[in-house]
Amino acid sequence: MELGKANKTDAVRDANKSIIEVSHLTKYYGKSRGIVDISFNVVEGEIFGFIGPNGAGKSTTIRLFMSLIYPTSGQAKIFGKDCIKYGPEIRQEIGYLPSEVFYYEGMKVRDLLKYSASFYKKDCTKRINELASLMELELDRRIDDLSYGNKKKVGIVQGLLHQPKLIVLDEPTAGLDPLMQHNFFNLIREENKRGATVFFSSHILSEVQRLCSRVAIIKEGKIMRIQDIKTLQRENYKKVRIVAENLDPRRFEVAGVANLEKVDGTLSFFFKGDINLMARLISESRVTDATIEDLSLEEIFMHYYK
Amino acid sequence: MNIFKYEFKTKLKSMITWSLSIYAVILIFMSLYQNFAEQTSLMAEMMASFPRELLIAFGMEDMDWSTILGFYGLAFVFVQICLGIQAANYGFGLVSLEETEWTADFLLSRPVSRRQIMTSKLLAAVTALGLTEIFIWIASLVYLIIFRGDELIPLEPMLLLLFSLPLFQLFFLTVGMLVSLLVKRVRSVTPLSMGLVFGLYTLNAFGDMIGEDSFEILSPFQHFEPSYIVKYNSWNMPQVTIGLVISLLALAASYWLYGRRNIASAV
Amino acid sequence: MNIFLRELRANFKSLLIWCGIVILFSVVGYSKFSAYYNNPELLAVVDAMPEAMIKAFDMDSFNLTTVTGFYGIMINYVALMLSIAAAMWGSDVVAKEERDRTVEFALTLPVRRSRLISAKLAAVFVNCMLLLFVSWATIIVMAQNYAPDTQFYNFVSTSLWAFFFMQMIFLALGIFLGAVLKQHKRAGSLAVSILLAAYFASILTEVSDKVSFLRYFTPFKYFDAQLMLREARLEGGFALLSLLIVAVALAGAYIAYSKRDLYI
């Protein structure tokens, strides 16, 4: 099963309908740039990754979606409606999981979730209980007393309790232990199968790799690249590691090889080119072990960091 | 409405505290009336025979110390200070508190418009202030009656005095709100409300002592000065209008500013 | 030293605002006074009053036709302003670490908590002194047009001491509240409440002699304006009382802050 791709038997899904349309969106904070002229679309049913280093403009973009801040120029549309003009309306169907969670003093978890639910035109009680038990969240504790990770769980439940059509995640797993992260991702996948579109902003690339079908890479306020994951990996280098005795590195210094390193008996490098050529070179050396694999998103990304 | 309910709940404690405190103030002050009346009856007679210029020079021309209502007027100014601080506290913190506590991200990402948020919060504040005022009206009436001795209290000026409180508090509520929207971040409400209230109080009180001037037109303590209301049995309409106009302008400006405000993020 | 300097800088804007307020107030006050200064009509009226009446109403002290009398009226409002400023600065300077969540930074530095308080106390003390100085300078400078005499200067100098004691009381009180209260947000509002109560008490004492005992509870009445004007002195007992309050409040602040758990 391919990650992030909609279940094709679901008749409601329309792979051509854009849930999010961003066109030439620009935001300057006074003189400092937030984001500059970014454009992209997110299609219904996909899990879209939005990755970039700190300060790249990820949170700015998300805050523009939620009309917490207003654009300097350009436009963003969600469900076909302008984010600013139709803000309250579209937010009925958006679930927002922020990176930092702050809630009102003195409130218990249950109170906050009920308060949040009161804004939506649905009855969310059942869903609240389901989500809370899934994330192992105690409903009757005071939010002030919770650890950071538990507060994040409140954020997760609060963002999903109204079964939104669009889920916007901003660094959602920071603070969660691995088991909870696992539960969380399953949860997102379930929501996605149900028909929800997911916009996932993160700099933990392994997560994005696990979940998303397409990614946009943003750096210094501009979109560097938008691509689906498979193509991104395929178009890039392969990581090769060879273990052998009496290895002569120079044999592998052919076109398409980069970052050649020899540490003890292990030779490692990146290779882009005809895989047959590489296979031949490897077989001609008496190797004890050889690994050829895709670059992780992390490693691809490092390329764009520079 | 859910926002209204929550906002009102947060104001409950302060509302009760203010109401009870001012209640105590009125009680204590009024209970001293008989004693005060004895001490000053002589003085009041003398003052009646003074040339007018002298009274003006000492800011005493409007003071009527011979009646209980006039005496109440003295306490009333202090009550105004307290109510001003309460309203200014609500005003300065109304929308800014969300940003100070970082809960703005939560509230503003709900499916509500900024206008709805503002209206709910305002209604909650006005309700809390209104309940405080009603409590004070009751306390004032009760203690005026209890401590009046044999005096008859003129109804009309008393009512005018008491009913001036809502407009008085409205001024501080709206102006506080406006100022909070003009700055980037309100880290602490107390210094601001103290500054606003005592600033306007001093502006008026000092002016009174020495003579009329132009600055005090901005001060609600001038618009609703108890000695004027008691003496002339009416509100100072031109000044009250000025105060109302300022309040309404501040209100409109606040809605406009909040609608356009960029909310800073915690990270 | 660095904490002290940082606090000075952080409070600088507030200091400027308060200085501005005091100067503005003086300007307005003096400009109004100019209408009464040496006003021939008023002088004639006062001259015509019988001696006994003058004594009864204290007209020689608070004769609005002289700058000394004028200052006698101004003095109450200056006291109020300086006290509010002191209370605000005091309560804010300690409580802000918890409010702004800088506690994790400031209090894990290699300094003892008591040194933190000392540095902050010093900084707001300097602020109060600067404000006092600006007030004094403004009053003196603007009085030059109105023939100030020795009595005026003595009056003003004595009043400075009164202001000093009042500032210290409210400053120490503010710091005490900021250091002791677990709910740091309450420090500012509690300081305000106490100040309001003190002000109210001072009004009460003027209204009725039954409650003259309240004089001990409100710094606004520790120092009698008449005494300052006529004899250019303060009552030693009340000066001592002030120092006592300051000492107790500060001691309490130091002890409490050093022993407390600090939360964010």
Image (cartoon, coloured by chain):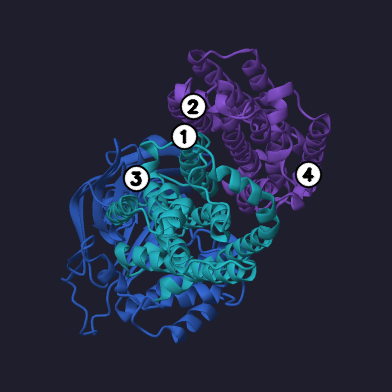
Mark yes or no: residue A26 visible. yes
* Residue tagged 3: A56
Q: Label 3 sits on what residue type?
A: Ala
At 43% from the left and 44% from the top, the residue drawn is A268
Mark yes or no: residue A282 visible. no
In this orientation, which residue lies closer to the viewer: B56 or A41? B56
Label 3 SS: loop
What's the CA distance linking mark 1 and mark 2? 7 Å
Query: Which image quarter holds the N terminus of chain B?
Result: bottom left
* Residue tagged 4: C216
What's the CA distance linking mark 3 and mark 2? 74 Å
Would you call the spot at circle 3 few (<14 residues within 10 Å), some (14-19), or many (20 or more)? Answer: many
Q: Which chain is blue?
A: A
Q: Which chain is purple?
A: C
Q: Label 2 sits on what residue type?
A: Leu
Q: Nearer the viewer, mark 3 or mark 1?
A: 1
